[in-house]
Image (tube, coloured by chain):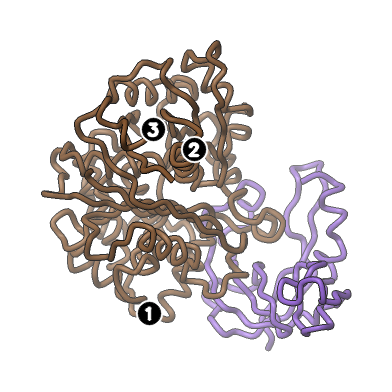
Amino acid sequence: MRDVAIIGIGCTTFGEKWGSSFRDLFVEAGALALEDAQLSGEKIDAMYVGNMSAGRFIEQEHIGALIADYAGLATHHIPSTRVEAACASGGLAFRQAMIAVASGMEDIVVAAGVEKMTDVEPGASTDTLTGAADREWEGFVGATFPGLYAMIATDYMHRYPLTREQLAQVAVKNHYNGARNPIAQFQQEITINTVLKSTMVAEPLRLFDCSPITDGAAAVIVAPLERAREFTDTPIRILASAQASDTITLHDRRDISTLDASVAAGQRAFRMAKLTHKDIDLIEVHDCFSIAEICAIEDLGFCKKGLAGRLTAEGETALNGRIPVNTSGGLKACGHPVGATGIKQVYEVVQQLRGEAGKRQIDGATIGMTHNVGGTGATVAVHIMGVD
Amino acid sequence: MSVARFWRKIPQRYNMLGTKCETCGRHFFPPRSFCPDCRRSGKVVDYKFAGLGTVVTFTVIHTANEQFEAFTPYVLAIVKLDEGPRMTAQIVCRPDQVTIGMRVKSVFRRIAADGESGIIHYGTKFVPVE
């Protein structure tokens, strides 16, 4: 297996982008990534694109070919493949691109993610997202995504000492980081009271516990490590790529408040990279809801089960903390265009490792981790990358 | 949900018909025809669940998908059936009444409808056992 490096990154701003179409979004992200790698499009050997539900959001399927076409590569006939795993689509697209290069099949590969969510009514987008859970046995009876994560929160708070204020601090911290990220959907700080006084969505989760509906796209370019310096002075090496699955329904899980797929993918990633938790300088985790960030920190092994709330309240996951979590603002503040999120996490970690993260820079960061979840934990992708 | 898609699941949705593996005794709801524990040596047969269970965790939904907007706030829970499997269902009770560990029994109820002229979805909800 060949070593693989990231040689270019690009991302649109995230938000309710009424003026941008699905095509505008991925073309912009792709062009930024190519420009970053100082690469011309005809050098691209293959593309993988993470996208959850263009079929329902914009009534368009066949996204692989569409993207290659609008990237100006139709006449090159390169393989272009859509990857779908609900909200983990981006993480899996990144992993497929990495595997394609590692295997020796391809050299220069684009991993992209895109979602255009605001062309449908909010009720329709909520319903579409419910498809990431079990439509027949969860969605059918009235479950929503916030509702499923709310049931994780209820179970968690019943068994572990997590306070409502500690949970709110996740959102407060992520908005603080988002306020320092020029691509973030929400660039304003909030207080614990903002969260506690926001609309109830599914008890105990309120509006500010939930990630928003977002349009956006991100792209990264990977290449064999041995060729990386042809394109960039700061290649970022992929140290581990792991993926795990679990039951599609929340109710069938071994433990309602542990995402076993996160545990499995995390352990595999650490083993592959031959690293321990102390080696990791920052993590981007899948905080689709505040409780999800709490679970992720624990399931990846950064603290014992039941302690992530205290860790968050004590500032250990803040920019200047022991293990900064979601320096981008996370899904909560940076936004969550579902298919793009896994690629945006990589985009953020690469910026941090290059020292290009501006006001949210973690000084001296050399190794970072991403954690991307599909559904309520039926798919998880974990990646570790480091300065070469 | 199309008529056929709803119709073919009626035995499960109306009557909680699942399956059970006679080799290891594990119950399945919704039914599985293949036992993940016994694999090819499993003998899976139909089994009608008694409909009694315990609330494992719950939430009160205030913001619902379109079909359920008229019912908010409603209680949604994961119920562990006495035979073993867990399922997601609504609990017909006041939002402040539901607790973890509460005993419940299944009832046949209207779940939702496909618009004003579409089919009505019936299925299983739970009520507290007095």
Whether residue A24 is visible to the viewer of this picture, yes or no, is yes
> What amino acid is at disc 3?
Ala
Q: CA distance from mark 1 to mark 3?
A: 37 Å
Can you give x and y, in whole percent of width and height, for residue A388 in the image?
A: 23, 43
Q: Earlier in the sequence, mark 1 or mark 3?
A: 1
Q: What hue represents chain B? A: purple
Q: CA distance from mark 1 to mark 2?
A: 42 Å
> In the image shown, does A127 or A96 lie closer to the viewer?
A96
In the rendered image of this protein, does residue A296 appear above or below residue A303? above
> In the image shown, does B121 or A239 lie closer to the viewer?
A239
Q: Residues within 10 Å of mark 3 (few under 14, many from 20)?
A: many
The residue carrying mark 1 is A160
The residue carrying mark 2 is A100
Q: CA distance from mark 3 to mark 2?
A: 19 Å
The residue carrying mark 3 is A218
The chain coloured brown in the image: A
Instruction: Specify the subunit that label 3 lies on.
Output: A
In the rendered image of this protein, does residue A296 appear above or below residue B67? below
Can you give x and y, in whole percent of width and height, for residue A121 in the image?
A: 55, 35
Question: In the shown orientation, is residue A365 left or right of residue A303?
Answer: left
Instruction: Specify the subunit that label 2 lies on.
Output: A
